[in-house]
Image (cartoon, rainbow, N blue to C red):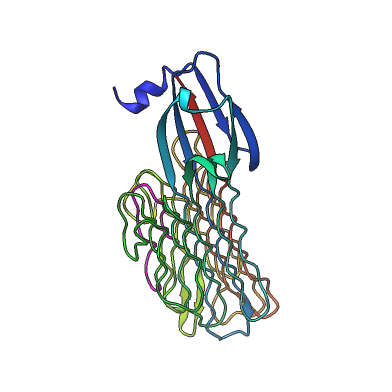
Amino acid sequence: MAIGNALNSAKDVQVFTTTGTTTWTKPTGAKFVYVVCIGGGGGGGGSAPLAVSTSNVGGSGGGGGAVVSKFITASDLPTSVPVVVGSGGTGGVNAGSLGTNGSSGGTSTFGSGATIYVVSYGGGGGGLGGGNTNRPGGGGGGTGSVGFTPGAVTTISGGLPGGSTTTAIAGNGGSGNNAAAGGNAEYGGGGGGAKNGATASFFGGSSMYGAGGGGAGGTIGTVGNSTPSAGGASGSYIAGGGGAAGTNGSTTTAGSSGTTRGSGCGDGGGGGGAATFNVNNVSGSNGGAGGAPGGGGGGGGAATGTGTAGLGGNGGRGEVRVYTF
Protein backbone atom coordinates (compact mmCIF):
# COMPACT_ATOMS: atom_id res chain seq x y z
CA MET A 1 0.00 0.00 0.00
CA ALA A 2 1.32 3.45 -0.90
CA ILE A 3 2.20 5.65 2.06
CA GLY A 4 -0.22 8.36 0.90
CA ASN A 5 -3.12 5.89 0.98
CA ALA A 6 -2.00 4.38 4.28
CA LEU A 7 -2.04 7.79 5.99
CA ASN A 8 -5.77 8.04 5.32
CA SER A 9 -6.31 5.09 7.66
CA ALA A 10 -4.39 6.59 10.61
CA LYS A 11 -6.38 6.46 13.87
CA ASP A 12 -4.82 9.69 15.14
CA VAL A 13 -3.12 12.59 13.33
CA GLN A 14 -1.33 15.42 15.11
CA VAL A 15 0.25 18.27 13.15
CA PHE A 16 2.60 20.64 15.00
CA THR A 17 3.01 24.07 13.39
CA THR A 18 3.84 26.38 16.33
CA THR A 19 7.57 27.03 16.53
CA GLY A 20 9.31 25.93 19.69
CA THR A 21 8.82 22.87 21.90
CA THR A 22 5.55 21.08 22.58
CA THR A 23 4.66 17.47 23.47
CA TRP A 24 3.16 14.54 21.58
CA THR A 25 1.21 12.05 23.71
CA LYS A 26 0.97 8.47 22.47
CA PRO A 27 -2.65 7.44 21.85
CA THR A 28 -4.03 4.37 23.59
CA GLY A 29 -3.71 1.21 21.49
CA ALA A 30 -1.02 2.62 19.17
CA LYS A 31 0.91 0.02 17.18
CA PHE A 32 2.95 2.07 14.70
CA VAL A 33 3.77 5.74 14.35
CA TYR A 34 4.76 7.54 11.16
CA VAL A 35 6.61 10.84 11.71
CA VAL A 36 7.37 13.59 9.16
CA CYS A 37 9.75 16.44 10.10
CA ILE A 38 10.39 19.49 7.91
CA GLY A 39 13.09 22.05 8.69
CA GLY A 40 12.56 25.81 8.51
CA GLY A 41 13.50 27.83 5.43
CA GLY A 42 16.44 30.24 5.39
CA GLY A 43 15.79 33.98 5.19
CA GLY A 44 16.68 35.84 2.01
CA GLY A 45 19.56 38.33 1.90
CA GLY A 46 18.94 42.06 2.26
CA SER A 47 20.21 44.71 -0.17
CA ALA A 48 21.40 48.34 0.18
CA PRO A 49 20.85 51.82 -1.34
CA LEU A 50 23.78 53.29 -3.28
CA ALA A 51 24.38 56.39 -5.38
CA VAL A 52 22.59 56.55 -8.72
CA SER A 53 24.53 55.09 -11.71
CA THR A 54 26.38 52.72 -9.35
CA SER A 55 26.28 48.94 -9.71
CA ASN A 56 24.20 47.54 -6.86
CA VAL A 57 23.08 43.95 -6.46
CA GLY A 58 20.05 42.53 -4.72
CA GLY A 59 20.12 39.91 -2.00
CA SER A 60 20.28 36.18 -2.74
CA GLY A 61 17.57 33.69 -1.81
CA GLY A 62 17.50 31.52 1.31
CA GLY A 63 17.68 27.73 1.12
CA GLY A 64 14.65 25.51 1.62
CA GLY A 65 14.22 23.06 4.51
CA ALA A 66 14.63 19.30 4.15
CA VAL A 67 11.97 16.64 4.81
CA VAL A 68 12.60 13.41 6.73
CA SER A 69 10.05 10.67 7.52
CA LYS A 70 10.21 7.44 9.50
CA PHE A 71 8.01 4.56 10.69
CA ILE A 72 8.50 3.72 14.38
CA THR A 73 7.08 0.81 16.38
CA ALA A 74 4.87 2.44 19.02
CA SER A 75 6.18 0.21 21.81
CA ASP A 76 9.64 1.73 21.24
CA LEU A 77 8.31 5.16 22.23
CA PRO A 78 7.52 6.50 25.71
CA THR A 79 4.05 7.78 26.57
CA SER A 80 5.06 11.32 25.58
CA VAL A 81 7.72 12.71 23.26
CA PRO A 82 8.96 16.32 22.97
CA VAL A 83 8.36 17.89 19.55
CA VAL A 84 10.43 20.83 18.30
CA VAL A 85 9.25 22.87 15.30
CA GLY A 86 12.05 24.90 13.73
CA SER A 87 11.46 28.56 13.02
CA GLY A 88 11.95 30.19 9.63
CA GLY A 89 15.12 32.22 9.21
CA THR A 90 14.88 36.01 9.39
CA GLY A 91 15.46 37.96 6.19
CA GLY A 92 18.52 40.19 5.90
CA VAL A 93 18.31 43.97 6.26
CA ASN A 94 20.05 47.11 4.98
CA ALA A 95 23.19 47.85 7.01
CA GLY A 96 24.65 50.85 5.15
CA SER A 97 26.56 50.24 1.91
CA LEU A 98 25.86 46.50 2.17
CA GLY A 99 22.91 44.46 3.28
CA THR A 100 23.15 41.51 5.66
CA ASN A 101 22.82 37.78 5.12
CA GLY A 102 19.56 36.10 5.99
CA SER A 103 19.67 33.71 8.93
CA SER A 104 19.37 29.93 8.75
CA GLY A 105 16.10 28.08 9.24
CA GLY A 106 15.62 26.07 12.43
CA THR A 107 15.81 22.32 12.95
CA SER A 108 12.63 20.28 13.51
CA THR A 109 12.74 17.15 15.69
CA PHE A 110 10.59 14.39 17.12
CA GLY A 111 12.36 13.85 20.42
CA SER A 112 14.97 16.03 22.08
CA GLY A 113 18.37 16.00 23.76
CA ALA A 114 20.06 12.60 23.61
CA THR A 115 16.87 10.89 22.40
CA ILE A 116 15.88 12.18 18.98
CA TYR A 117 13.91 9.76 16.82
CA VAL A 118 13.53 11.92 13.70
CA VAL A 119 15.29 15.16 12.73
CA SER A 120 15.23 17.47 9.70
CA TYR A 121 17.39 20.53 9.12
CA GLY A 122 16.68 24.03 7.87
CA GLY A 123 18.03 25.95 4.88
CA GLY A 124 20.92 28.41 5.01
CA GLY A 125 20.39 32.16 4.86
CA GLY A 126 20.73 33.96 1.53
CA GLY A 127 23.81 36.07 0.77
CA LEU A 128 23.77 39.84 1.23
CA GLY A 129 23.40 42.40 -1.53
CA GLY A 130 24.90 45.87 -2.08
CA GLY A 131 27.64 47.16 -4.36
CA ASN A 132 28.89 44.65 -6.90
CA THR A 133 29.18 41.98 -4.21
CA ASN A 134 28.72 38.46 -5.52
CA ARG A 135 27.30 36.32 -2.72
CA PRO A 136 25.68 32.91 -3.28
CA GLY A 137 22.24 31.80 -2.17
CA GLY A 138 21.78 29.80 1.00
CA GLY A 139 22.35 26.06 0.79
CA GLY A 140 19.29 23.85 1.03
CA GLY A 141 18.84 21.99 4.31
CA GLY A 142 19.89 18.34 4.32
CA THR A 143 18.89 15.28 6.30
CA GLY A 144 22.22 15.50 8.14
CA SER A 145 22.90 19.22 8.68
CA VAL A 146 21.65 22.77 8.15
CA GLY A 147 22.36 24.28 4.73
CA PHE A 148 25.32 26.64 4.70
CA THR A 149 25.04 30.45 4.78
CA PRO A 150 27.46 32.41 2.51
CA GLY A 151 30.58 34.20 3.61
CA ALA A 152 32.97 35.74 1.08
CA VAL A 153 32.91 32.58 -1.05
CA THR A 154 31.62 31.55 -4.46
CA THR A 155 30.30 28.06 -3.71
CA ILE A 156 27.86 27.12 -0.96
CA SER A 157 27.10 23.49 -0.24
CA GLY A 158 23.71 22.15 0.64
CA GLY A 159 23.32 20.38 3.97
CA LEU A 160 24.85 16.96 4.64
CA PRO A 161 25.05 14.00 4.15
CA GLY A 162 26.48 14.80 0.74
CA GLY A 163 27.14 18.52 1.01
CA SER A 164 26.28 18.86 -2.68
CA THR A 165 27.68 21.84 -4.60
CA THR A 166 25.44 21.15 -7.60
CA THR A 167 22.06 19.46 -7.84
CA ALA A 168 21.42 16.91 -5.12
CA ILE A 169 19.89 13.49 -4.64
CA ALA A 170 18.73 11.52 -1.59
CA GLY A 171 19.05 13.66 1.56
CA ASN A 172 21.53 16.22 0.25
CA GLY A 173 20.51 19.87 0.23
CA GLY A 174 20.72 21.84 -3.02
CA SER A 175 23.64 24.24 -3.52
CA GLY A 176 23.68 28.04 -3.58
CA ASN A 177 26.50 28.88 -6.01
CA ASN A 178 27.48 32.28 -7.43
CA ALA A 179 26.07 33.22 -10.83
CA ALA A 180 23.67 30.27 -10.86
CA ALA A 181 20.20 29.13 -9.99
CA GLY A 182 19.86 27.36 -6.66
CA GLY A 183 20.63 23.65 -6.84
CA ASN A 184 17.69 21.27 -7.02
CA ALA A 185 17.23 18.48 -4.48
CA GLU A 186 15.28 15.30 -3.79
CA TYR A 187 14.54 15.15 -0.03
CA GLY A 188 16.81 18.07 0.90
CA GLY A 189 15.74 21.67 0.37
CA GLY A 190 16.38 23.59 -2.82
CA GLY A 191 19.26 26.08 -2.79
CA GLY A 192 18.70 29.84 -2.89
CA GLY A 193 19.07 31.70 -6.17
CA ALA A 194 22.21 33.86 -6.59
CA LYS A 195 23.37 36.80 -8.74
CA ASN A 196 26.03 37.24 -11.40
CA GLY A 197 27.31 40.57 -10.16
CA ALA A 198 24.88 43.23 -11.35
CA THR A 199 24.16 41.50 -14.66
CA ALA A 200 21.75 38.68 -13.74
CA SER A 201 19.61 37.22 -10.96
CA PHE A 202 18.70 33.53 -10.77
CA PHE A 203 15.82 31.26 -9.75
CA GLY A 204 15.60 29.49 -6.43
CA GLY A 205 16.24 25.75 -6.57
CA SER A 206 13.38 23.26 -6.34
CA SER A 207 12.98 19.95 -4.50
CA MET A 208 11.01 16.83 -5.34
CA TYR A 209 9.91 16.29 -1.73
CA GLY A 210 11.58 19.05 0.34
CA ALA A 211 10.95 22.80 0.25
CA GLY A 212 11.94 25.27 -2.47
CA GLY A 213 14.68 27.90 -2.17
CA GLY A 214 14.09 31.65 -2.51
CA GLY A 215 14.75 33.62 -5.69
CA ALA A 216 17.35 36.39 -6.00
CA GLY A 217 16.41 40.07 -5.75
CA GLY A 218 16.67 42.54 -8.63
CA THR A 219 19.97 44.32 -9.32
CA ILE A 220 21.09 47.63 -10.80
CA GLY A 221 23.90 47.55 -13.36
CA THR A 222 25.82 50.36 -15.04
CA VAL A 223 24.05 49.56 -18.32
CA GLY A 224 20.61 48.67 -16.92
CA ASN A 225 18.77 46.35 -14.57
CA SER A 226 18.52 42.63 -14.20
CA THR A 227 15.11 41.43 -13.13
CA PRO A 228 14.49 39.55 -9.87
CA SER A 229 13.75 35.83 -10.04
CA ALA A 230 11.08 33.42 -8.85
CA GLY A 231 11.53 31.08 -5.93
CA GLY A 232 11.88 27.33 -6.33
CA ALA A 233 8.99 24.89 -5.99
CA SER A 234 8.31 21.80 -3.92
CA GLY A 235 7.34 18.81 -6.07
CA SER A 236 9.71 19.73 -8.91
CA TYR A 237 13.30 19.15 -10.03
CA ILE A 238 13.43 22.28 -12.20
CA ALA A 239 14.56 25.63 -10.70
CA GLY A 240 11.88 28.32 -10.36
CA GLY A 241 8.13 27.77 -10.34
CA GLY A 242 7.59 29.01 -6.76
CA GLY A 243 6.71 32.51 -5.51
CA ALA A 244 6.68 35.03 -8.36
CA ALA A 245 9.39 37.66 -8.69
CA GLY A 246 8.62 41.31 -8.07
CA THR A 247 9.20 44.00 -10.70
CA ASN A 248 11.88 46.65 -11.23
CA GLY A 249 11.06 50.26 -12.02
CA SER A 250 10.67 53.77 -10.67
CA THR A 251 8.07 52.14 -8.42
CA THR A 252 9.12 48.60 -7.52
CA THR A 253 7.04 45.66 -6.33
CA ALA A 254 7.79 42.94 -3.81
CA GLY A 255 8.34 39.27 -4.52
CA SER A 256 5.35 37.02 -3.88
CA SER A 257 5.29 34.61 -0.97
CA GLY A 258 5.80 30.95 -1.73
CA THR A 259 2.78 28.65 -1.59
CA THR A 260 1.95 27.21 1.86
CA ARG A 261 0.72 23.59 1.92
CA GLY A 262 -1.08 21.44 4.45
CA SER A 263 0.68 18.40 3.02
CA GLY A 264 4.07 18.35 1.35
CA CYS A 265 6.38 21.37 1.71
CA GLY A 266 6.33 25.08 0.90
CA ASP A 267 7.70 26.94 -2.12
CA GLY A 268 10.43 29.58 -2.04
CA GLY A 269 9.56 33.29 -2.08
CA GLY A 270 10.26 35.45 -5.13
CA GLY A 271 12.97 38.12 -5.25
CA GLY A 272 12.06 41.78 -4.72
CA GLY A 273 12.25 44.39 -7.47
CA ALA A 274 15.11 46.91 -7.86
CA ALA A 275 15.14 50.63 -8.63
CA THR A 276 15.42 51.69 -12.27
CA PHE A 277 18.99 52.32 -13.42
CA ASN A 278 19.97 56.01 -13.40
CA VAL A 279 16.82 57.14 -11.53
CA ASN A 280 17.71 58.53 -8.09
CA ASN A 281 16.04 58.01 -4.70
CA VAL A 282 14.00 54.94 -5.60
CA SER A 283 13.38 52.18 -3.06
CA GLY A 284 13.86 48.48 -3.71
CA SER A 285 11.19 46.03 -2.63
CA ASN A 286 11.25 43.15 -0.20
CA GLY A 287 11.72 39.53 -1.11
CA GLY A 288 8.72 37.27 -0.69
CA ALA A 289 8.37 35.09 2.39
CA GLY A 290 8.96 31.38 2.04
CA GLY A 291 5.84 29.24 2.08
CA ALA A 292 5.26 26.98 5.07
CA PRO A 293 6.60 24.56 5.81
CA GLY A 294 10.23 25.21 4.94
CA GLY A 295 10.28 27.54 1.93
CA GLY A 296 13.31 29.86 1.61
CA GLY A 297 12.79 33.63 1.57
CA GLY A 298 13.45 35.71 -1.54
CA GLY A 299 16.26 38.26 -1.75
CA GLY A 300 15.59 41.99 -1.37
CA GLY A 301 15.85 44.40 -4.32
CA ALA A 302 18.51 47.11 -4.67
CA ALA A 303 17.76 50.84 -4.19
CA THR A 304 19.24 54.20 -5.25
CA GLY A 305 20.10 57.35 -3.27
CA THR A 306 17.83 57.94 -0.28
CA GLY A 307 15.54 55.07 -1.27
CA THR A 308 15.08 52.16 1.15
CA ALA A 309 16.64 48.86 0.11
CA GLY A 310 14.54 45.71 0.01
CA LEU A 311 14.61 43.35 2.97
CA GLY A 312 15.09 39.64 2.49
CA GLY A 313 11.92 37.59 2.89
CA ASN A 314 11.59 35.47 6.01
CA GLY A 315 11.86 31.72 5.61
CA GLY A 316 8.82 29.52 6.17
CA ARG A 317 8.52 27.79 9.56
CA GLY A 318 9.10 24.07 9.89
CA GLU A 319 6.53 21.44 10.77
CA VAL A 320 6.16 18.02 12.44
CA ARG A 321 3.36 15.59 11.51
CA VAL A 322 2.66 12.45 13.54
CA TYR A 323 0.34 9.71 12.25
CA THR A 324 -0.62 6.88 14.59
CA PHE A 325 -1.87 3.45 13.49
**For residue 27, above or below residue 248:** above
At x 53% / y 46%, what residue is drawn? Answer: 291
x and y percentages locating residue 92 in the rendered image: 61, 65
Q: Between residues 190 and 164, which one lies in front from this camera angle?
A: 164
Using the rendered image of the protein, determine whether residue 292 is visible from the camera's viewpoint: no
**For residue 54, above or below residue 281:** below
Using the rendered image of the protein, determine whether residue 225 is visible from the camera's viewpoint: yes
Q: Can you tell which quarter of the image residue 310 is in?
A: bottom right
Q: Between residues 100 and 248, which one lies in front from this camera angle?
A: 100
Q: Tell me how many marks there are.
A: 0
Q: Can you tell which quarter of the image residue 97 is in?
A: bottom right
Quarter of the image with the N terminus is top left
At x 62% / y 75%, what residue is drawn? Answer: 48
Quarter of the image with the C terminus is top left
x and y percentages locating residue 201 in the rendered image: 43, 69
x and y percentages locating residue 228 in the rendered image: 48, 65
Which residue of the protein is positioned furthest toward the top in this rendering? 29
Magenta residue check for 36: no
x and y percentages locating residue 43 in the rendered image: 57, 59
Q: Is residue 234 left or right of residue 50?
A: left
Q: Between residues 229 and 159, which one lies in front from this camera angle?
A: 159
Magenta residue check for 185: yes
Magenta span: predominant SS is: loop
Q: Can you tell which quarter of the image residue 177 is in?
A: bottom left
Per the rendered image, the range of residues in magenta is 178-191
Which residue of the protein is positioned furthest toward the right in this rendering? 306
